[in-house]
Image (spheres, rainbow, N blue to C red):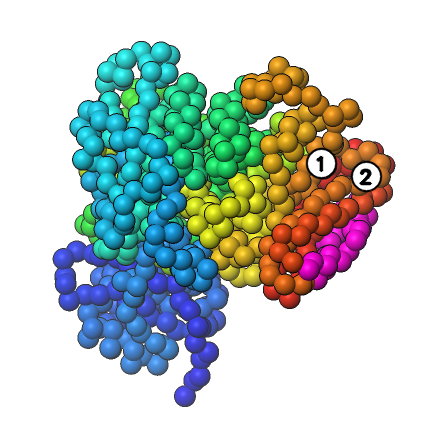
Amino acid sequence: MKFVRVLSFILLATLVVGHDDARKHYIVYMGQHSHPSSEFVISANHDMLASILGSHKGAKEATIHHYTNSFRGFSAMLTPDQATKLSENEDVVSVFESRMNQLHTTNSWKFLGIDSIPKYNKLTTDIQSDIIIGVIDSGVWPESQSFNDYGLGPVPTKFKGECVSGENFTQLNCNRKIIGARYYYKGFEAINGPLENSNQTFFRSARDSDGHGTHTSSTIAGSKVSNVSLYRLGSGTARGGVPSARLSIYKACWFGGCEDADILAAFSDAIHDSVDVISISFGPNPPQQNYFEDVNSIASFHAFQKGIVVSASAGNSIFPRTAANVAPWMITVAASTVDREFPSYVLLGNLKQLKGFGVNTTPDQGKLYSIISGGVAAASGIPSTNASFCKSNTLDSNSIKGKIVVCMLEKLNDDRKEKAIEVKKGGGAGMIIIDPIGKYVLFQSVIPSVLIGNTEAEELQTYMKTEKNPTARIYLTVTNVGIKPAPAMAIFSSKGPNIITPDIIKPDITAPGVNILAAWSPLATKDTAGNSINYNIISGTSMSCPHVSAVAALLKSVHPYWSPAAIKSAIMTTATTTDNTQNFIRNDGSTNATPFDYGSGHINPAAAVDPGLIYDFDTNNVIDLLCSYGASIAQLKNLTETPISCKNPPTPSYNFNYPSIGVANMAGNLSVYRTVTYTGQGPTVYYSKLEAIAGVKASVYPNVLRFSKSGEKMTYRVDFVPYKSSNGSFEFGSLTWRNDVHMVRSPIAVNVISI
């Protein structure tokens, strides 16, 4: 008898194929293998399954996944009898049913361990639900079950907001969950003309016809709703991060755009209404304007003055120096993955499988289709290069009819849905888009479609060049949970350094922002292939920002008197820089992520509740920072509305008491100062640990901090002695203070311009 070591985990997937209720999704696990390649494993798997099902065609149709690397196995739609017969094969270690019913839809909250926070869970419901989050976005769909107010008490007495009636929205649409609703359009109309000119569905009210605002709001504070999915993808229970919290909605965005004037009005009302947290999942296009000409910076400064935490998305601009919303008084959020993905595999005629991503949920005929490149199917008079992008009126219908069309991107912001419409118009059977940027991001299409990355594209193109009649089949999308490594940084997430105040590392934090399932407006069909749905899966820093907004609200519940800076510090200094394989978080490629990708790291809500030490700062400290930035008295008045005098000389910006440490222009020896506040109970001792920085010798004084009581403050100094220029690029390290319980970590970024 041969003994095989069984792995302790297997990535589970689920799929519904056809209408045979007797079939279920089974995992067939065979341990390690000695096959020379993935192709041999796939062939052997098909042979094994064909011996049970009676044909290779049936085997290929039934198979969902092939596990071909570190171990051998596959998953397939089988009857219980077929599964039993497979389990009797001497090569099979085990056969078991996929348990997708155990998974949750907003899997990000499970991934973040939000339910395992004793300090929060011990709070009474009244205290938990006293927190109010203001969401400035595209409105809300109040009928969504995610906004039911079951179990909530009266509206908090501190709330000063209103439920403003409008088109298809009355005061009855507010409840004890959605306690306020306002809308703003005058700024938009001043620039773009009447809303009616858009020829799109809209409501002159807080009602959401775009979907974006409904999605972000429910991610923050949506009530628990069972049996939620997107066409059975990600099936489970939907919930927000703080289901007991209240929402006040400020609709300032129309048709994907948010005018500054409307945003400022929304901020003004939100501050007045006494919200605790403001969430903004929008920002300016890069480059970021200076703080005094950026409405988000100005408005959020006023929120900061009133003790309101502002959480903001960093943007989806991909490249370095593109991070938006970088004011140090905001929490700037990057986007990363969770341990769940939704692949849609492509089976080639040579039996190779390519991993793609899409929303393909309608069973096909189980056959292979011919593949053709868009460039080969150019319409009359259209250059091949233009046709390769599959844009409107570029493809010849006679060439693509009944085939899967391979399309390229002309620009990163190409409309993928438009390409699918063009292929369908010509009678195409499906579409494969080569998309290295958004390859793992789901998008919904009018025909079976997948996005693939460069590696898969090379394999596809090699096959198409060498095969006389290339064929392929796009499989239905499945749900995989337990993905490793996770998190990884999203390719699209905007990156630092901060181009306004380079000594302040931005973004601050990363959080789940890829393929997040949350509530949706059923009238927002533009991004859902024309289908009316109540829950949708979308990606972006727009999705990661609400996660941080929810954690900020949670911290505000536990620590009602903490300042916005203290809450930001707790979130940043407790972040993790490793993934679920205990390796450093990576970018999508082969490189380790840096503080310019993820800030201080990946958010860790359970640790943030009890950070040990915090870096606090107030309005006066912010003014000192702006003075060092070179702000004029007139500029400062735009923020403070009161006369300001700057210190002479100003406090260096690298000495701003931020939870991270940045020195953008290090010319010779330099010392950086920080002050920490102890938040624990009873005496304790913290010890310092410095992570080495290339080209710089660093030391900490004192290197031990002794505290006797909560609230005590201590200042330390980090001395930097550069011995090698960094040639215009930043070098990274970190400083961690630790005692027996806590680790308080600050990333360090320095650019040595001279020694």
Q: Amino acid at mark 2?
A: Leu
Q: Between residues 443 and 569, which one lies in front from this camera angle?
A: 569
Which label sits on residue 654? 1
Name the chief secondary structure element in magenta.
strand
Number of numbered discs on residues: 2
Q: Which residues are magenta?
A: 685-708
Q: Residue at x 61, y 64 (%)?
A: 741
Which mark is first along the chain, 1 or 2? 1
Q: Nearer the viewer, residue 728 or 151?
A: 151
Q: Secondary structure at mark 1?
A: helix
Residue 693 at x, y = what percent?
75, 48
Residue type, numbered disc 1: Tyr
Q: Position of residue 441 (x, y in %)?
A: 39, 42
Residue placed under numbered mark 2 in the picture: 670
Task: Establish if 93 lies above or below 690.
Answer: below
Asked whether disc 2 touches disc 1, contact meaning CB atoms under 8 Å apart, the reply is yes
The residue furthest bottom is: 1
In the rendered view, does 105 fall on the left or right side of 409?
left
**Secondary element at tag 2:** strand
Residue under the point 78% across and 26% down: 649
Task: Give the residue drawn at x 42%, y 69%.
Answer: 9
